[in-house]
Image (cartoon, rainbow, N blue to C red):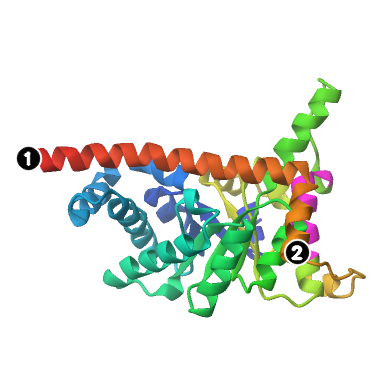
Amino acid sequence: MANQVEQLKEHTIVVSDTGEIEAVKRIKPQDATTNPSLITKAAGMSQYAKLIDDAVEYAKGDLALAMDKVSVNFGTEITKIVPGYVSTEVDARLSFDTEATIAKARKLIELYKEVGVDKSRILIKIAATWEGIKAAEVLEKEGITCNLTLIFNKVQAIACAEAGATLISPFVGRIMDYYKEEELKKNPDFKGFKGPEDPGVKSVTEIYNYFKKHGYNTIVMGASFRNTDQIVHLTGCDRLTISPTLLDEMAASTEKISVQLDAAKAADMDIAKVDSSEKAFRWAVNEDPMATDKLAAGIRGFSADIVKLEKVIAEKIEAASAK
């Protein structure tokens, strides 16, 4: 009997959610995603010191360039392992600056080009603020493919698709976290959500069905999983990006899984078109306390990890200049 990862791969493209190159080698996914938190964690591991040192030497004292080069160095190594996309994230502190996001994306693609990695292999990962979505719209027209991340609301997702984003990442686990916390306030004995009743699973399912009903080509990639139950109940989604820990757990199980999301069935559903203009977008996110809270928290979290990594890189630049 096939294990659950093998079964999942029959219906969904499996993506590895890690900055650890050794884990990607072991898992052998189609694509890989990274983020500032994962890169910061990996940067502290001795086996990746050469990638950090190379970036410091390359940048010649320029901290911003060194930070970009670190991301590209990790991404480049991962492109040697996976056959598909590698996501590289733009500095989260630029999440409300369209022009700066565009400039940073172009710079990352330029650095990839220098080491022989074609832009077709890279997804530029951008927080799905209105400003980030508008940046992605420009970049996609230039042939720079984008992964709009930190998706917590259907209108937010639709705005990304309308902008022509190649891929979006709705955050299953973080949505569930919010509603679990709300339930615990009412009932301290609440044990959690199960299966299709999980709010994160419901959100991704709703987005997936809407996209397939209305013919959007934007890839839906569920992200931020807390348990394998969430993954199993999104079998059939275009892509799912999963941590090595959860993939290992699924690889150890042969329990049968079945398709939950079906594009053909979605196409026959009665789903009305939704306004995703700027006014509609801002109002929808404003009226959704979970989306407002989690989008802001996600940007703050990624920004904090960038600051941590900057400190490490700045110390290495200082040490190199003192030699």
Question: Residue 152, how many percent across, how many down?
Answer: 70, 51
| Crowd around label 1: few <14 · some 14–19 · many ≥20 (10 Å) | few
Q: Is residue 15 left or right of residue 318?
A: right
As for residue 123 lying within the magenta part, the answer is no
Q: Residue at x 22, y 55 (%)?
A: 59
Question: Residue 187, how many percent across, how many down?
Answer: 85, 23
Q: Which of the labelled discs sits on residue 323, or is there none?
A: 1
Q: Is residue 171 left or right of residue 320?
A: right
Residue toward you, 37 or 104? 104
Residue situated furthest right in the rendering: 270
Please state the extent of the stretch shown in magenta in the rendering: 197-209
Residue toward you, 177 or 249? 177
Residue toward you, 305 or 260? 305
The residue beneath circle 2 is: 208
Q: Amino acid at mark 2?
A: Tyr
Q: Is residue 296 above or below residue 106?
A: above
